Amino acid sequence: MKIKVISSNWSGDSRNYTPKEEETLYEIQLNKKYTVKVRECSNTEGNKWEEEIFSFEITQIGDDYISIHCFQRFSAENEKGINLMGKTQDFTININKPIRLITPTMDYGDIFTLSLVK
């Protein structure tokens, strides 16, 4: 099995905004950290650093599912709207049942769709 991650984003500022999607396949490996998206940051003093937007670790592997722990908080798609107070970091992905994780932010955010591929 492999895990497929489709990364995209959303914006509430523009009706004509069309996000681009990026698809990545990862080999499944228990207790391995996967870093999907990082952002380069800087401050007025010229200091630069990278901030992880989405990274996770596979904590359990079953015949038709995996469990992951995310190092960031997410709002799961099954919630109504985006839960800005979302603190969920642990998710289970079943075969043939993708999950969508959304950054708990206003006006602009990232969406990650995770599915299992045999």
Image (tube, grey):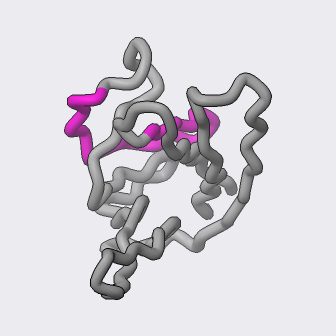
Give the residue drawn at x 46%, y 43%: 93
Res 52 → quadrant: bottom left
Of all residues, the one furthest to the front in this rendering is 44
Give the residue drawn at x 38%, y 18%: 79
Tell whether 100 sits left or right of 48: right
Q: Is residue 75 above or below residue 23?
A: above
Residue 2 on image: x %, y %: 61, 63
- Is 63 a magenta residue? no
Tell whether 38 sits left or right of 74: right
- Is 93 a magenta residue? yes
Numbered disc total: 0
Residue 92 on image: x %, y %: 38, 42
> In which quadrant of the rendered image does the N terminus lie?
bottom right
Q: Is residue 41 above or below residue 85?
A: below
Q: Is residue 101 above or below residue 117?
A: above
Residue 80 on image: x %, y %: 40, 12
Residue 94 on image: x %, y %: 50, 40
Question: From which residue to which does the magenta span run?
Answer: 84-102
Give the residue drawn at x 48%, y 32%: 107
Q: Nearer the viewer, residue 51 or 116?
A: 51
Q: Nearer the viewer, residue 28 or 55?
A: 55
> In which quadrant of the rendered image does the C terminus lie?
bottom right
